[in-house]
Amino acid sequence: MDIHLLEIFIQTAHEGSISKTAKKLNYAQSNVTHKIQQLEADLQTILFYRHKKGVTLTPSGQVLVGYAEKILNTINEAKTVVGSSSIPSGPLVIGSMETTAAVRLPSVFAQYHLKYPKVDFSLVTGPTEKLLHGVLHYELHGAFVSGPIEHPDLTQDKVIEERLVLVTSPNLPRIQSIHDLQNHTMLVFPKGCSYRAKLNTLLQEEGLLPVKLMEFGTLETIIACVSAGMGITLLPYSIIADYEVRDKVTCHSLPEKYSSVTTMFVKRKDTLITPALSAFLDETKKEIPQS
């Protein structure tokens, strides 16, 4: 099986469009179409349904995606092993929730970069759901997510336990009860965020009607809008502590059963522990003592 055909197949599956794939790979659209047809002929099956909006994987295509990702990942690992030494080097792509990246990881990144300058390090931030997808599809070597996570293809290690708090403007009255949330707009990250999911669970279990939600993409924007009195958010206290000291926000405790959230580091069970990844995990343990 031609590895190059698999690479084009995976890219097309991710893009859902032959034209977008051609643009991404800098190929002629007809070339991509020909390569997909060649792979389909080799496998004697149809991999994509063609329609006006692009392409969609057939059941056979959905099966092939998993195998193709494993094959390409194994080839990349083989290249790494054959060409690597004991000195950490090469690419390392780590995912993280934005809140963890903002508060817990800067010291890790700084020390790691100082000690291992030959590593081509990349950080991808996003909600837990997106990060898990990236790890499972070999796009990330590992990720810091909200846990615990139950998945047969993943391993997880506890990094730290966080205390969640409700955050408001100092100019708003104190939150006396969970039921006070019905009177306020909640400022949240996009869907897939664990804190947003925690908020939904809290509201459902307390029998509250859904409050108005406003969605924002960055931590800084949410904190600034909360400080300005636009609404309330739910965040780890470690993120917000300095803002409270400077009277930018006010924190409100949650009932114990809602207040705890665990940050986990997850990776695939079949992930190769390269010197670069091993050194990163060691540095994380040094800079973030487990609670």
Image (cartoon, rainbow, N blue to C red):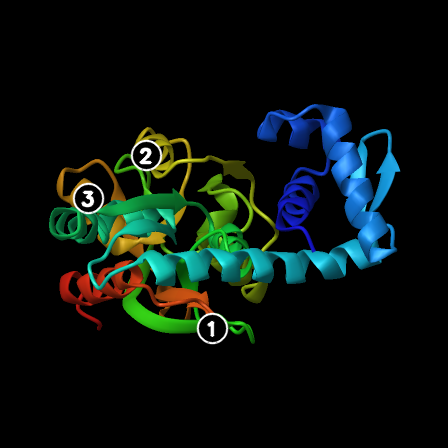
Q: Which residue is mark 1?
A: 269
Q: Nearer the viewer, residue 8 or 270?
A: 8
- Mark 1 and mark 3 lie on one chain; the one further toward the N terminus is 3
Disc 2 + disc 3, Cβ < 8 Å? no
- The kind of residue on which mark 2 rests is Glu
* Disc 1/disc 3 C-alpha distance (Å): 40 Å
Q: Are marks 1 and 3 in contact (CB under 8 Å)?
A: no
User: Is residue 121 visible to us here?
Assistant: yes
What residue is shown at x 67% (from left), y 28% (from top)? 22
Of tags 2 and 3, the one toward the viewer is 2
Q: Badge 3, how many Cα within 10 Å: few under 14, some, many 20+?
A: some
Which of these two is toward me, 286 or 175?
A: 286
Q: Is residue 235 above or below residue 216?
A: below
Q: Amino acid at mark 1?
A: Lys
- Residue 244, labelled with which disc? 3
Q: Position of residue 233 (x, y in %)?
A: 40, 45
Name the side, left or right, on which 201 lies relative to 18.
Answer: left
User: Within the image, what quadrant is residue 14 found in?
Assistant: top right
Rendered location of residue 287, percent (x, y): 15, 61
- Evaluate if marks 1 and 2 touch, with contact meaning CB atoms under 8 Å apart: no
Q: Secondary structure at mark 2?
A: helix
Helix, strand or loop for disc 3: helix
Say which quarter of the image contains residue 137.
Answer: bottom right
Q: Secondary structure at mark 1?
A: loop
Q: In this figure, which residue is indicated by the disc labeled 2?
A: 220
Q: What amino acid type should be assigned to the residue bearing mark 3?
A: Glu
Please name the residue shown 32% across and 64% down the image.
Answer: 274
Give the image location of residue 257, x and y in percent.
41, 72
Q: Quadrant of residue 19?
A: top right
Q: Residue at x 82, y 49 (%)?
A: 40
Please determine whether, in this image, residue 231 is positioned above or below residue 47: above
